[in-house]
Image: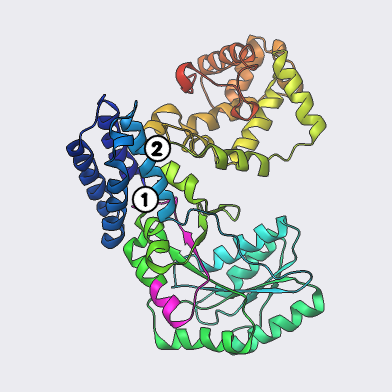
Amino acid sequence: MAFESLTDKLQNVFKNLRGKGRLTEEDVKTALKEVKMALLEADVNFRVVKQFVKSVEARAIGADVMNGLNPGQMVIKIVNEEMTALMGSETTEIAMQPGKSTTVIMMCGLQGAGKTTTAAKLAGKFKLKGKKPLLVACDIYRPAAIEQLEINAKKQNVDAFSMGTKNKPLDIAKAGMEHAQKNGNNVVIIDTAGRLHIDEEMMQELQEIKENITVHQTLLVVDAMTGQDAVNVAKEFDEKVGVDGVILSKMDGDTRGGAALSIKAVTGKPILYVGMGEKLSDLEQFYPDRMAGRILGMGDVLSLIDKAQANMNIDADKEKEMASRMKKGKFDFEDYLESMKQMRNMGGLSSILSMMPGIGGKSAEIESMVDEKQLAHMEAIVLSMTPAERRNPKLLNPSRKHRIARGAGVDISIVNRFIKQFEQSQKMMKQLPGMMGGFGGKKGKFKLPF
């Protein structure tokens, strides 16, 4: 996961600070030297790192901090605040045109950054907000780019417009605007061509579109895995075409994450969204304060809540009924399947745990807490039951359990342990959130039955 190495290093620095009852100026400088090295290794721009450390040091070495009751905690608070400021302080929304006016967004970026997929993800976001987006395919060079956009548009249930590969991108964009006016599309997203590197031909095409069509927002998609190069790309695009905001793709990959900490400071352009997976729903709004919390190992509970609300597809009556059964300890296997479905919609248990305070960013610790393969085996056991057995686990006699074990492809002992633990978990439902499915152990550990 992004920032994992940085998070581990910063937490070690902060652990040493917390262990000191009183801080000296030398303690702070030593800690900040380690912070500086950690940021540089995370591929954060060196000028940004220099200014960041300078700002933290100016605030941390003072009477209020040094003589405070918990100086270590105060330094961590200052680092958190300065890191949030570094990434923009406030969340920036895509500026929409007022009233019924159509908002035109042009997507740009290098080939391979995930621009076409991000365009479709963005269209899905607008659709959820009650807009009627249109995706316009202007990438006439990359093989299957148009087809990819059309397929993704269909998955998102949004409109798409294309004219093949024999027309100029500008002509396609103009025709797309006419199509939007005729069909009532109030958001037009133009997917332009990318290149393996920045060249004059690429920039000329983008400039032509902006000169002939009123583009309200030019959004640059950059690959977070390219590290410092992502910042250089953003700077060059802004200088030659003009960029209003940046979307970081592939933030879920094995990346050092330096781009997220550098782009705003170097280019002055805000990060609007981050791509956190390959699914078309895996696009998260960028919150500087929440990202700082993730980097510093404080978790991101607010984003977890947002995910839960966005993916809660059960109606209010069903939700109330499930909550009532939990309080009475009557959570059955049908409820378990519904919980697994909701958890999967939120990215899976590993994704949820990565946002929890003290766990976020530690993939090794998350892997030791839960095995997604084992969870799949549990689900297979439940799916091997009849609907009556799911609703009434008391029906599960030895012969039924043997049938379920054969159906799930597991040993009967595993089925027995699973059912026993499920019965124990029913008693704990009053304390556990329904979306977790009820497999809670001590100190937040998710104890698996095998």
For the residues bearing labels 2 and 1, Cβ distance under 8 angstroms: no
Res. 186 image quadrant: bottom right
Is any atom of residue 239 visible in this view? yes
10 Å crowding of disc 2: few (<14), some (14-19), many (20+)? many
* Residue 174 spot, x, y in % from top left: 67, 86
Q: Report the span colored magenta.
A: 235-256
Residue 335 shown left or right of residue 105 in the figure: right
* Residue 419 spot, x, y in % from top left: 59, 15
First in sequence: mark 2 vs mark 1: 1
Work out whether residue 407 or residue 341 is closer to the camera in this orientation and state it: 341
* Residue 1 spot, x, y in % from top left: 40, 46
State whether residue 353 is above or below residue 89: above
User: Which residue does the numbered mark 2 point to in the structure image?
Assistant: 297
User: Which residue does the numbered mark 1 point to in the structure image?
Assistant: 254
Magenta region includes residue 252: yes
Work out whether residue 113 or residue 66 is closer to the camera in this orientation and state it: 66
Identity, as a three-letter code, of the amino acid under mark 2:
Gly
Residue 59 shown left or right of residue 338 in the figure: left
**Residue sitting farthest toward the front:** 63
Residue 55 shown left or right of residue 212 in the figure: left
For marks 2 and 1, give the CA distance.
17 Å
Residue occupying image coordinates x 64% and y 36%: 341
Identity, as a three-letter code, of the amino acid under mark 1:
Asp
* Residue 234 spot, x, y in % from top left: 41, 70
Res. 105 image quadrant: bottom right
Residue occupying image coordinates x 31% and y 31%: 71
